[in-house]
């Protein structure tokens, strides 16, 4: 068995199925997973090569590539759509009440923090109008929220559910501002990806086979049970996660461009701007199975993607 060390904030449905139903093992892979809790630590560890693959937000990858100069590369897209909410403490009933207050944050220039900025700017509230303390991922932001250290936080389930249960107020839904957000991708240092091409292709093949299996109607119930057990989550959350799975882990050039456009809009990606193709390589996915090559070529032509004959061979 060849070992691949991965990290991320949750094990995704396809990951759970690939592990539990033997798709990783079928490709001769042992896939370890270390849960990330603090974005700066995760980002530094990826930059230093502590893990080969991160299964987390493509936006984080793009942020660290463009702002820190670390050459990361996306090779797979795992999930699309974002369940995230800007939630206020009891007594905070509007976005206007956040002016001059302290909010919980993560790295400040990627993912949920970026979306928080978009939400607040849409309502005329600039970053200078409030303070942010970098705390960590949703469970840690929730802890600060419940302790009253911050008046609001961007949270994802199940942390958001706990915040609402404690009397939190819904101030905004991320989906209303960034629909079809690329939630999770597979990415790593370009030099590691390129030097481990065979491992990456086998990883994609196992992941894609897992999506094929879990998206079959007759496997729905078993998949939900596996996800609930692996993540210690309720059925509603498992079904939400199931609904975000990208078939075969195929990259969507359109959604990656959305990330770049948002970063440019919010001023966190100054010029000169690279084309979206700088940040991903479709060829790893294409060569995983010749049948996918044809599908990939068609999808790329529809989306103006880079998977031309020179790339997919």
Image (cartoon, grey):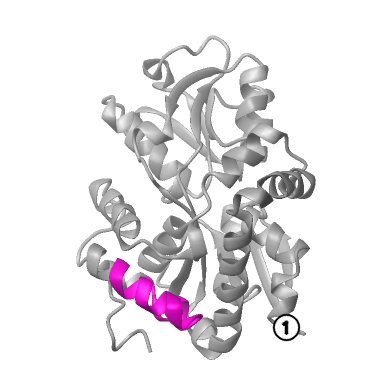
Q: How many marks do you count on the picture?
A: 1
| For residue 289, above or below residue 90 | below
Judged by its main secondary structure, the magenta piece is helix
> Horizontal and vertical percent for residue 39?
57, 54
Q: Would residue 281 be counted in the magenta stretch?
A: yes
**Looking at this view, is 141 or 10 the one in front?**
10
Q: Residue at (74%, 65%) from the top-left corner?
A: 19
Q: Would residue 76 be counted in the magenta stretch?
A: no
| For residue 87, above or below residue 82 | above
For the residue carrying disc 1, how many other residues have a C-alpha within 10 Å: few (<14), some (14-19), or many (20+)?
Answer: some
Residue 304 in sight here: no
**Looking at this view, is 226 or 278 the one in front?**
226
- The quadrant in which the C terminus is found is bottom left
| Quadrant position of residue 305 | bottom left
- Which residue, given by chain and number where applicable, does mark 1 sit on? 28
> Horizontal and vertical percent for residue 285?
46, 76
Farthest-out residue, top: 91
**Looking at this view, is 23 or 53 the one in front?**
23
> Horizontal and vertical percent for residue 183?
48, 51
The local secondary structure at tag 1 comes to loop
In the visual, does 133 lie left or right of 50? left
- The quadrant in which the N terminus is found is bottom right
| Quadrant position of residue 24 | bottom right
Q: Residue at (72%, 78%) from the top-left corner?
A: 26
Q: Residue at (36%, 72%) from the top-left corner?
A: 296
> Horizontal and vertical percent for residue 270?
24, 59
In the visual, does 196 lie left or right of 96? right
| For residue 120, above or below residue 36 | above
Q: Which residues lie in the magenta part?
A: 280-299
């Amino acid at each position: 068995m060849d070992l691949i060390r991965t990290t991320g904030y949750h094990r995704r449905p396809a990951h759970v199925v690939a592990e539990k139903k033997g798709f990783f093992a079928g490709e001769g892979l042992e896939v370890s997973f270390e849960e990330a809790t603090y974005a700066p630590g995760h980002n530094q560890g990826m930059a230093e090569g502590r893990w080969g693959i991160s299964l987390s937000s493509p936006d984080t990858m793009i942020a660290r590539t463009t702002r820190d100069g670390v050459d990361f590369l996306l090779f797979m897209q795992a999930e699309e759509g974002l369940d995230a909410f800007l939630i206020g403490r009891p007594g905070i009933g509007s976005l206007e009440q956040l002016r001059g207050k302290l909010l919980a944050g993560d790295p400040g220039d990627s993912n949920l923090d970026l979306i928080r900025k978009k939400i607040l700017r849409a309502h005329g509230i600039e970053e200078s109008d409030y303070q942010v303390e970098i705390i960590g991922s949703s469970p840690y932001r929730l802890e600060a929220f419940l302790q009253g250290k911050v008046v609001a936080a961007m949270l994802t389930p199940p942390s958001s559910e706990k915040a609402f249960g404690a009397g939190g107020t819904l101030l905004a839904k991320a989906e209303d501002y960034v629909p079809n957000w690329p939630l999770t991708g597979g990415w790593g240092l370009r030099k590691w990806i390129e030097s481990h091409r065979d491992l990456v292709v086998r990883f994609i093949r196992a992941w894609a086979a897992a999506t094929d299996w879990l998206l079959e109607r007759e496997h729905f119930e078993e998949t939900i049970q596996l996800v609930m057990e692996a993540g210690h989550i309720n059925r509603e959350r498992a079904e939400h996660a199931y609904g975000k799975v990208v078939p075969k882990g195929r990259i969507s050039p359109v959604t990656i461009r959305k990330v770049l456009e948002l970063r440019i809009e919010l001023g966190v990606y100054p010029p000169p701007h690279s084309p979206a193709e700088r940040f991903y390589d479709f060829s790893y996915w294409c060569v995983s199975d010749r049948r996918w090559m044809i599908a990939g070529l068609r999808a790329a032509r529809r989306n103006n993607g880079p998977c031309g004959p020179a790339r997919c061979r």
